[in-house]
């Protein structure tokens, strides 16, 4: 392993052999050597030493100079200013290796050293895990530390390769950068505590001018555990909970995402990725379709999209399409004029009108009848509605988030759902895993709900006994998070002492420890569980198969061979069923692409 320490700051005192500027313009990058002594003028005018053809750069914008091995930059009175690592330069300031300089919209990275830009690429997830595991072995042997830094980049202005280059420019040679899912991850040996935080803050400041918004999360071994995946998960969770430009240090392995008036508990890696995806989708105008079982948190996910969107100050209007009788749906959605039908004694705006400017959440959208689907499609396509009993069209401005526990593509194939509406709603599809597939989250959610229930009841937090945890862990949770929340609230109400034992849990839970998962329960609009809705078994199995295939593809980054292995399905069958289930090809790469 290379142990040379080239972290900036440490190297400032020693004169560098060569100094360079890396000019990033559009999708290209150019390496410009600096003189050993002297200066270059950067600008848009023909006389500049380094000519930068960009309207945001002044004719003579800045001077970069080298005197006695030390580099500096000066603003030559430019119109848009000079920034170093985001800070405006007043007059002259020294430059350190890895400093990111912005002149208007143009970015330069200053580098010093023998090897200006070693062609180091981001490691693939597997390589990064292997590297982390080596470092963890070293920690076991030496008692030193290793930190994992997750960097979530929201709106990169340059290609990923440039971000990685900038990171390597600011890191020591012993550090490694890799990519896990959409997250840039740094493995920083021998660093923990304040040193690791300082390194993280520096890297965020280096990336920010290139990447817009960056959030960082930090986890360190041995303090946060000695398992590579757990450390990665903890660092990514911390990054998700961090504000833009902030580094969040991993705390307990659970985060409450504050989403305005709601908060969501996130601990499972799949859920973290999902909320990360929702945050990205939120800023686009795309309609989002959420797949998930009842009580799995679909409404929370829809709320997250609304909360993170530019519509958050406008209404969020939920409608459970399964809870309304067919005769009422139309009036509820589109509104009515006075006298439109018997009992319509006054005019009333429908949900679409009320959601105008904000977000309409259509829960269980597959339950809408075909005639209502046609009207909804027209309203969404044309952004106008007509109230019942009225001939006037009224403009609406809608963003729709829809949810269903069914596979909508199958509903289309069966003729129960309009294909055009399906396409209209499913520009972005996210799959919310059921609680039984989030074993890491279960105890954390249980504790979080218990703390809330105890606080509301005005009693000190209770302790869940090991036996109770076992019962919770063995239950299949057909009602998902809602069922868990209800069970915990029940336990808080029935436990007389400080410890919750299995006998304090609802009877239904205790007696079903060994029972197979049940079909889903439908919910009424008021949140009250209604009798179980039984599905055709073949249909349920198809849904399950499709869901597992999608999850396997997501877990393997779209690599079909490995996804097929994960769920024990022959590759040819897997490939055949991808088509059968209409799983979009973009979700997965074929064996040839692996
Ligand atoms: N990650 C979470 N953290 C905290 N509370 C959660 C979480 N997920 C779900 N809940 C809670 O569980 C309950 C059910 O969640 P939600 O209403 O979002 O589920 P749903 O999938 O929309 O259900 P349905 O399909 O029945 O409409 C709510 O009280 C919600 O606040």
Image: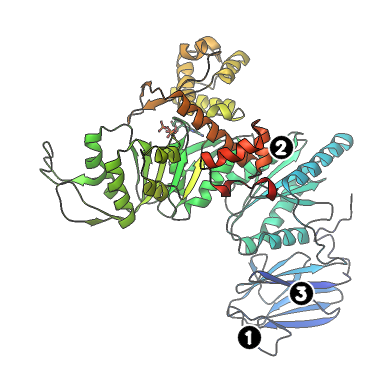
Badge 3 marks a residue whose secondary structure is strand
In front here: 259 or 273?
273
9 displayed left or right of 387: right
To which quarter of the image does residue 138 belong?
top right
Mark 3, other Cα within 10 Å: few <14 / some 14–19 / many ≥20: some
Q: Residue at x 78, y 82 (%)?
A: 39
> What is the distance, in whole Å, between disc 2 and disc 3 at their CAs?
42 Å
Vertical relation: 356 (above or below) 489: below
> What is the distance, in whole Å, between disc 1 and disc 3 at their CAs?
20 Å
Mark 1, other Cα within 10 Å: few <14 / some 14–19 / many ≥20: many
Q: Residue furthest bottom?
A: 47
Question: Is the distance from the Cβ of mark 1 to the nearest ligand 1 atom less than 8 Å?
Answer: no
Residue 354 at x, y percent in the picture: 28, 48
Residue 61 at x, y percent in the picture: 65, 81
> What is the distance, in whole Å, between disc 2 and disc 1 at their CAs?
51 Å
Front position among marks 2 and 1: 2
Marker disc for residue 72? 3
Q: Is residue 262 visible?
A: no
Mark 2, other Cα within 10 Å: few <14 / some 14–19 / many ≥20: some
To which quarter of the image does residue 486 belong?
top left
Which residue in the protein does label 2 denote?
A: 229
Q: Is residue 522 visible?
A: yes
Which residue in the protein does label 1 denote?
A: 59
Query: Quadrant holding ligand 1?
Result: top left
Which of marks 3 and 1 precedes in the sequence?
1
120 displayed left or right of 496: right
């Amino acid at each position: 392993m290379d142990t040379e320490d080239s972290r900036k700051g440490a190297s400032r005192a020693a004169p560098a052999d060569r100094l360079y500027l890396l000019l990033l313009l559009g999708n290209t990058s150019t390496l410009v050597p600096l003189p050993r002594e002297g200066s270059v003028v950067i600008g848009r005018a023909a006389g500049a030493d380094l000519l930068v053809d960009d309207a945001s750069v002044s004719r003579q914008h800045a001077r970069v100079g080298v005197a006695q091995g030390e580099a500096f930059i000066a603003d030559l009175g430019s119109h848009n200013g000079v920034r170093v690592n985001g800070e405006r330069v007043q007059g002259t300031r020294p430059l350190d290796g890895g400093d990111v300089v912005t002149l208007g919209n143009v970015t330069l990275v200053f580098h010093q050293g023998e090897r200006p830009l070693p062609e180091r690429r981001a490691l693939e997830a597997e390589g990064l895990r292997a590297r982390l595991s080596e470092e963890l072995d070293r920690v076991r042997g030496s008692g030193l530390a290793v930190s994992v830094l997750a960097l979530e980049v929201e709106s990169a202005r340059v290609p990923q390769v440039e971000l990685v280059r900038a990171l390597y420019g600011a890191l020591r040679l012993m550090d490694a950068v890799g990519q896990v899912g959409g997250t840039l991850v740094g493995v920083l040996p021998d660093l923990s505590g304040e040193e690791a935080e300082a390194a993280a803050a520096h890297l965020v400041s280096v990336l920010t001018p290139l990447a817009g918004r960056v959030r960082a999360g930090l986890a360190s071994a041995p303090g946060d555990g000695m398992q590579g995946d757990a450390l990665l998960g903890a660092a990514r969770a911390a990054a998700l909970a961090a504000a833009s430009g902030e580094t969040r240090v991993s705390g307990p392995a659970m985060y409450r995402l504050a989403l305005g008036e709601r908060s969501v508990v996130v601990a499972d890696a799949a859920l973290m990725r999902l909320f990360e995806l929702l945050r990205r989708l939120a800023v686009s105008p795309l309609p989002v379709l959420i797949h998930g079982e009842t009580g799995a948190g679909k409404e929370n996910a829809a709320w997250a999209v609304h909360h993170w969107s530019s519509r958050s100050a406008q209404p969020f209007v939920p409608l459970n399409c399964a809870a309304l009788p067919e005769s009422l749906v139309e009036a509820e959605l589109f509104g009515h004029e006075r006298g439109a039908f018997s009992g319509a004694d006054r005019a009333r705006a429908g949900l679409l009108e009320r959601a105008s400017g904000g977000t309409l959440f259509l829960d269980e959208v597959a339950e809408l009848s075909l005639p209502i689907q046609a009207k909804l499609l027209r309203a969404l396509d044309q952004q106008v509605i007509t109230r019942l009993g009225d001939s006037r069209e009224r403009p609406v401005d809608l963003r729709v988030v829809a949810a269903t526990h069914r596979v909508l593509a199958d509903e289309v194939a069966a003729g129960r759902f309009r294909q055009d509406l399906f396409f209209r709603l499913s520009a972005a599809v996210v799959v919310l895993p059921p609680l039984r597939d989030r074993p890491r989250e279960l105890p954390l959610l249980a504790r979080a709900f218990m703390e809330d229930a105890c606080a509301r009841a005005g009693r000190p937090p209770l302790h869940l006994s090991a036996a109770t945890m076992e019962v919770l862990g063995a239950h299949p949770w057909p009602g998902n998070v809602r069922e868990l929340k209800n069970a915990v609230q029940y336990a808080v109400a029935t436990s007389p002492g400080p410890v919750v034992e299995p006998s304090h849990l609802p009877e239904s839970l205790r007696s079903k420890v060994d029972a197979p998962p049940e079909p889903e329960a439908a919910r009424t609009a008021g949140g009250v569980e209604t009798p179980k809705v039984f599905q055709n078994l073949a249909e349920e199995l198809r849904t399950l198969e499709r869901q597992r295939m999608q999850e396997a593809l997501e877990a393997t980054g779209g690599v079909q061979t490995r996804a097929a292995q994960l769920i024990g399905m022959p590759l040819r069958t897997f490939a055949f069923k991808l088509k059968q289930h209409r799983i979009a090809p973009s979700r997965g790469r074929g064996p040839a692409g692996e």
